[in-house]
Amino acid sequence: KRWIHLPKRPARFGTLSMAANKRRMSLTSTADDAEVLQSLLSRKKSFREISVVGARQEQQIVRYDHEQLADLRVILQPWSRGSIFRRASIWWQIFFYVALAGSIAALFDCLVKAPADINPDAVSKVSNYFNTFLPFLFGIYLNNIFNRWWAMRTQGVGGINQSLNSMVVIMASQHRGADSEGTKKLLLRYGLLIHELVY
């Protein structure tokens, strides 16, 4: 389950209006209902500070600035919000592999007294043997990755788009009166919000 919460921080800008908030800063700001907007403003929270918490209570990215993330300086900021390097599990894995490499290097240094006497021909044969079928395995791996990506694109995002289009067409054909305009707009907003939550 995902929950939307408002962190307890001061608002970055005081008052907002529907016309002034053309640039949407988060998925919650896509709701153009005046009651929702007034409810958020009464809490004195800005749209920038609305965040989504995942199943493991980690912060999810709601919206990002493409121009800022496309800059090379972002590489020097691995602690930025939303980066995978803010997870403790990533640092434990990095520490484990560095410690493993250091242990293997220390073991070879202790066990091999004369490194110049090592014959590299056997290692070269093993390397050539692995080079014969590693490209084949790498091709299978890439094929699986592309298949997963395409399934996510067609069945995930594409399925949401198809369902939303079908719902809009059914509502437009079955409810033609002016009294159902509010219901149709509400369902369309919910559908667009679901599509926004995918990203």
Image: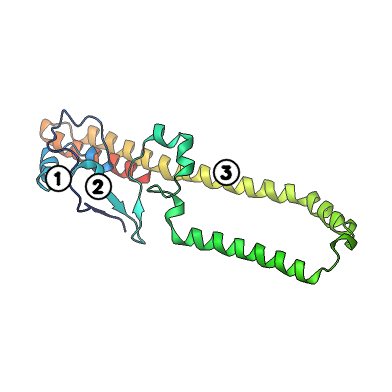
Q: Position of residue 128 (x, y in %)?
A: 84, 51
Q: Nearer the viewer, residue 84 or 179?
A: 84
Label 2: how many Cα within 10 Å (few below 14, some 14–19, many 20+): some
Question: Label 2, label 1: how many angstroms apart (C-alpha)?
Answer: 10 Å
Question: Label 1, label 3: how many angstroms apart (C-alpha)?
Answer: 41 Å
Q: Secondary structure at mark 3?
A: helix
Q: Position of residue 197 (x, y in %)?
A: 33, 45
Q: Quadrant of the C terminus?
A: top left
Q: Which residue is denoted by mark 1 in the rendering?
A: 40
* Number of marks drawn: 3
Q: Nearer the viewer, mark 1 or mark 3?
A: 1
Residue 60 horizontal side relative to residue 133, left or right: left
Q: Nearer the viewer, residue 180 or 19?
A: 19
Q: Secondary structure at mark 1?
A: helix
Q: Residue furthest bottom?
A: 111
Q: Position of residue 14 (x, y in %)?
A: 13, 38
Q: Secondary structure at mark 2?
A: loop
Label 3: how many Cα within 10 Å (few below 14, some 14–19, many 20+): few
Q: Which residue is denoted by mark 2 in the rendering?
A: 50
Label 1: how many Cα within 10 Å (few below 14, some 14–19, many 20+): some
Contact? badges 2 and 1 (CB < 8 Å): yes
* Three-letter amino acid code at the position of disc 3: Phe
Report the residue at 25% width, 31% height from top: 23
Q: Nearer the viewer, mark 3 or mark 2?
A: 2
**Lower sequence index among marks 1 and 3:** 1
* Three-letter amino acid code at the position of disc 1: Leu
Residue 119 horizontal side relative to residue 69, left or right: right
Residue 176 horizontal side relative to residue 131, left or right: left
Q: Position of residue 63 (x, y in %)?
A: 33, 41
Q: Nearer the viewer, residue 33 or 110?
A: 110
Q: Which residue is denoted by mark 3 in the rendering?
A: 146
